Amino acid sequence: MASMAKISIIGNVGRDPELRMTSGGRPVCDFSVAVNRVSTSAGERTEQTDWYRISCWGKQAETAQQVVQKGQQIYVDGRFSPREWTTKEGEKRTSLDISCNDFQLLGSRRDREGGMGGGPVPGGQGADAPAGTFDPDEIPF
């Protein structure tokens, strides 16, 4: 019997990719992607951001490290696995991890706002993030 677990997301890259090598010498590249959800309840509009930790492997990891930049809009297709962990303060957290099968760069915020190129977003990370959002750098890897 066949089975499949797959996820596809479109969002904005939250931090520049970091390339490292496994103990076996295989390249792995990690970066985060923010996906925004908008809902309306009782006439009130709310927006929530979900953060995903993306891992690319092998040749794809090397490519991602070279072409993916913070602020770009990206499509990611892969295998999803939530992972629970505990902070130093004893709080339980969940990390939304995706092992990437494929990705496609779609642009950057500056491109969509009429700017040119894919440079850093003015104001840096968190300038337009709602208060209390999850910081992927808090995940202990």
Image (cartoon, rainbow, N blue to C red):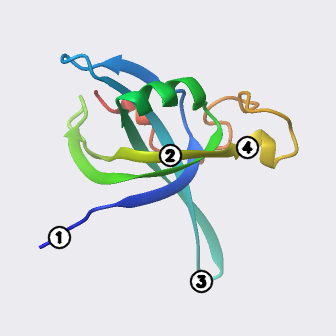
* Mark sitting earlier along the chain (3/4): 3
In the rendered image, the quadrant that contains the N terminus is: bottom left
Comparing 92 with 79, the one in front is: 79
Q: Callout 3, which amino acid? A: Ala
Q: Callout 1, which amino acid? A: Ala
* Mark sitting earlier along the chain (1/3): 1
Mark 1 or 2, closer to the camera: 1
Distance from the alpha carbon under mark 1 to that under mark 4: 39 Å
Comparing 130 with 139, the one in front is: 139
Q: Are marks 3 and 4 in contact (CB under 8 Å)?
A: no
Is residue 131 at least partly visible in the picture?
A: no
Query: Which residue is disc 3 drawn over?
Result: 42
Query: Which residue is disc 4 drawn over?
Result: 109
Mark 1 or 3, closer to the camera: 1
Query: Which residue is disc 1 drawn over?
Result: 2
Instruction: Classify mark 2: helix, strand or loop.
Output: strand
Mark 1 or 4, closer to the camera: 1
* Mark sitting earlier along the chain (1/2): 1
Query: Which residue is disc 2 drawn over?
Result: 103
Is residue 22 at least partly visible in the picture?
A: yes
| Residue at left offset 76%, top offset 31% | 122
| Residue at left offset 74%, top offset 28% | 119
